[in-house]
Image (cartoon, rainbow, N blue to C red):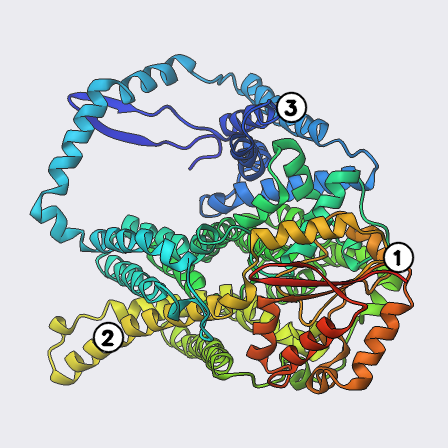
């Protein structure tokens, strides 16, 4: 694609050649700006969200590339990463500058884009050819053209030779046909300690993923790039969108504390006060989501519900682009993107700063690595880095370490770019040191301890199996990445930059446990580098031709290579899927529970205490009112497992129950104890409590005359102790 245009062509329709007019970055900037303006009209919220989404993912990036040449291999990622980063920076600056007006922010961004394009048109005297566009639209969407294409498609679909050449496409179609009818069974799936894949129609999900991965491998082996891309899209659809389709509310209890912050900004037009939580100092994610919701009238909860699939589309796009700027062929690049999707079991794609931070980090790496082709992209990489720093606490430090190594070793340029990166990073941290210090800058220089999980109990068999699967997949990915380095060295392929990306995150374990989650971050950050290393070796195995080998040993070796590559990839996909949905009965949040917890929180005064055994199924910190509650009592929603594993393994002793009753009696506001199906299953799953302990606690509270049942349904019991 040239600096100013991209040529897209259609084929022949009848005897008339239909040519799509040139699409230039200036045109994209105008279209996205106009659509952003239309998003402020009183249209259905879903339509407004789509219109505004075009502005978010294509607007500012197109305007920047109207004036600045970016190498072709980086452009696919450059448009969305620059657009997202600019929106993040603009909305955050408006909030910090006390100029919070979402509609004005949108209007200004759209106007600047349109003005930039008009200036480019005038300077180059290349105005959009509206006549050509109208002619193209009349030809392409005419009744005769559509009828001809439909007839041609029907004839093609029944052509045996076409079907024989496109078996991979048929496998994808079969996977979708099997997947859609399985969704109701997944939605009604009962409890299984092994997660979703062994409950209801869960096994069908495994079959569908096996078909999709098999289709991908066949398409790659036959050099069918478009079908390989379709396989990647189907994998995202089946692995990630399934969760959205079969639930009526976002999963994970901890999602809702992020929803609450965005809703606070949406309600009050300001950040939560300092001291409530650390998020006020890293507010960009919450600011930009509140802006999007305000302009589009699309709710925060629906946004959180569809968030994960969008994140995975961006991850796949950026990993593909990262491989391309490292001069990998398209087959290698799409293989890396597919592997990144299949082995990502971590579940850090929910509505949270971490997800956006990870996306910004990969986009930053695309621009930074493209600096070896054109120096200016290294400077443009400062934009996503500046957007990342106020978005997430940990990701920019990993990214700074990795990019510093690449810059010093001259795998990116200019080498001195590390100094402005350091100024942005440390300049942001320094005035916040007093706020961050209580949370712990470092948790000790003990990599082994820092690598420990935040759950130390062995739990039941299902938990042990899922944990073993996750560890095996992670170890396999790191192990294959190390073997791939040797393969790349021997075959003279590029490996230094992916190696630094793959293993640079391990350094985080030297000084930070991140609340027992550092090991998950290490694996997540390593995924792009690992798949970039593994993809060429996987392709070499898939490309082995047994029939072309002359000796029996070579033929056997080729067959083994192809078989291992195929079965290994399908196995990795199955392990990744199990790791992703293995906690299924614990992480589901029902809409009825969400509505009830919001109503309960809103109806009670600040200072009210809400106690659970384990935070699951009833997210108290899910509305803007959490700030008032936290100001009155910072532990207003602390679960009992907050007091540590020893406390829970003994619970409920007479002294513990006496202390709970005494504390409740001293308050001048109500106290609620909430037992949910999810929390009880979680306590059993992890082995946090003795068998029968929850039943003993429930019997005690029911027999206590000071407590009464506030509400009860099949999933939740809420007990209330009124203020004395």
Residue linked to disc 2:
563
Say which of 552 and 594 sits in front.
Answer: 594
Q: Is residue 185 above or below residue 666?
A: above
- How far apart, in angstroms, are the residues tagged by discs 3 and 1? 44 Å
Say which of 125 and 468 sits in front.
Answer: 468
* Quarter of the image where the C terminus is located: bottom right
Query: Residue 614: percent from the left, percent from the top?
Result: 67, 71
Dot 2 crowding, Cα within 10 Å, few <14, some 14–19, many 20+: some
Query: Residue 445: percent from the left, percent from the top?
Result: 74, 82
Residue linked to disc 1:
632
Q: Earlier in the sequence, mark 1 or mark 2?
A: 2
Q: Is residue 55 above or below residue 257?
A: above
Q: Earlier in the sequence, mark 2 or mark 3?
A: 3
Q: Is residue 504 visible?
A: no
Give the number of callouts: 3
Q: In this rendering, would 510 be left or right of 368?
A: right
Q: Is residue 27 above or below residue 318?
A: above
Q: In this rendering, would 306 be left or right of 634?
A: left
Image quadrant in which you'd find residue 439: bottom right
Q: Secondary structure at mark 3?
A: helix
- The residue positioned farthest toward the left in the image shown: 160
Residue 111's tag is: 3
* Quarter of the image where the N terminus is located: top left
Q: Secondary structure at mark 1?
A: helix
Which residue is painted at 10% across and 42% down in the image? Answer: 158
The answer to the question of whether label 1 and label 2 lie on touching residues, with beta carbons closer than 8 A, is: no
Query: Residue 334: percent from the left, percent from the top?
Result: 37, 56
Q: Is residue 218 visible?
A: yes
């Amino acid at each position: 694609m040239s600096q100013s245009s991209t040529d897209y062509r259609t084929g022949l329709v009848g005897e008339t050649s239909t040519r799509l007019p040139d699409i230039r970055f200036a045109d994209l900037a105008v279209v996205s700006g106009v659509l952003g303006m239309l998003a402020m009209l009183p249209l259905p919220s879903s339509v407004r969200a789509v219109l505004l989404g075009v502005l978010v993912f294509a607007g500012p990036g197109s305007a920047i590339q109207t004036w600045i040449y970016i190498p072709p291999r980086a452009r696919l990622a450059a448009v969305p990463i620059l657009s997202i980063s600019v929106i993040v920076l603009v909305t955050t600056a408006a909030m910090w500058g006390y100029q919070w007006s979402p509609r004005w922010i949108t209007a200004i961004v759209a106007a600047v884009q349109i003005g930039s394009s008009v200036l480019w048109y005038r300077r180059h005297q290349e105005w959009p050819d509206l006549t050509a566009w109208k002619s193209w639209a009349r030809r392409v969407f005419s009744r005769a053209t559509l009828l001809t294409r439909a007839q041609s498609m029907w004839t093609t679909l029944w052509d045996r030779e076409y079907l024989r050449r496109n078996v991979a496409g048929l496998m994808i179609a079969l996977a979708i046909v099997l997947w859609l009818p399985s969704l109701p069974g997944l939605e009604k799936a009962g409890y299984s300690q092994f997660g979703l894949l062994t409950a209801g129609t869960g096994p069908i999900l495994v079959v569908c993923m096996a078909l999709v991965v098999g289709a991908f491998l066949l398409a790659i082996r036959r050099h069918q790039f478009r079908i390989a891309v379709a396989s990647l899209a189907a994998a995202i659809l089946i692995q990630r969108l399934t969760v959205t389709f079969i639930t009526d509310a976002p999963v994970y209890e901890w999602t809702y504390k992020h929803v609450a912050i965005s809703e606070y900004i949406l309600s009050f037009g300001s950040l939560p006060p300092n001291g409530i939580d650390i998020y006020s100092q890293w507010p960009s994610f919450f600011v930009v989501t509140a802006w999007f919701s305000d302009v589009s009238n699309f709710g925060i909860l629906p946004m959180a519900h569809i968030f994960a699939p969008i994140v995975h589309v961006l991850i796949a796009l950026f990993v593909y682009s990262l491989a391309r700027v490292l001069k990998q062929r398209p087959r290698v690049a799409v293989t890396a993107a597919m592997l990144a999707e299949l082995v990502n079991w971590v579940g850090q794609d929910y509505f949270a700063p971490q997800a956006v931070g990870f996306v910004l980090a990969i986009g930053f790496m695309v621009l930074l690595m493209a600096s070896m082709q054109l120096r200016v992209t290294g400077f443009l990489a400062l934009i996503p880095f500046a957007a990342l720093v106020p978005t997430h606490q940990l990701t920019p430090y990993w990214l700074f370490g990795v990019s510093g190594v690449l810059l010093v070793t001259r795998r990116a340029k200019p080498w001195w770019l590390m100094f402005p990166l350091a100024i942005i990073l440390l300049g942001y941290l320094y005035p916040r040191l007093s706020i961050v210090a209580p949370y712990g800058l470092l948790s000790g220089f003990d990599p082994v301890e820092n690598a420990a999980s935040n759950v130390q109990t062995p739990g039941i068999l299902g938990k042990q199996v899922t944990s073993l699967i996750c560890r095996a997949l992670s170890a396999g990915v790191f192990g294959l990445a190390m073997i791939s380095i040797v393969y790349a060295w021997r075959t003279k392929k590029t490996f230094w930059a992916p190696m630094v990306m793959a293993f640079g995150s391990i350094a985080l374990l030297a000084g930070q446990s991140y609340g027992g989650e550092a090991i998950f971050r290490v694996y997540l950050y390593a995924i792009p580098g690992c798949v970039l290393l593994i993809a060429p070796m996987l392709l070499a195995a898939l490309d082995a031709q047994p029939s072309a080998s002359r000796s029996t040993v070579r033929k056997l070796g080729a067959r083994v290579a192809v078989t291992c590559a195929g079965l290994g990839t399908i196995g990795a996909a199955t392990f990744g899927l199990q790791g992703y949905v293995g906690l299924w009965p614990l992480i589901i949040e029902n809409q009825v529970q969400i509505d009830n917890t919001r109503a309960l929180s809103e109806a009670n005064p600040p200072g009210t205490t809400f106690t659970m055994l384990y935070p699951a199924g009833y997210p108290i910190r899910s509305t803007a009112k959490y700030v008032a509650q936290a100001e009155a009592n910072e532990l207003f929603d602390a679960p009992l497992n907050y007091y540590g594993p020893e406390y829970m393994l003994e619970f409920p002793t007479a002294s513990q129950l006496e202390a709970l009753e005494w504390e409740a009696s001293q308050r001048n506001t109500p106290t609620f104890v909430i037992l949910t199906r999810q929390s009880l299953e979680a306590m059993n799953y992890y082995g946090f409590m003795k068998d029968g302990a929850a039943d003993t606690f429930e019997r005690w509270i029911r027999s206590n005359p000071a407590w009464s049942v506030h509400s009860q349904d099949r999933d939740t019991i809420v007990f209330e102790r009124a203020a004395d």
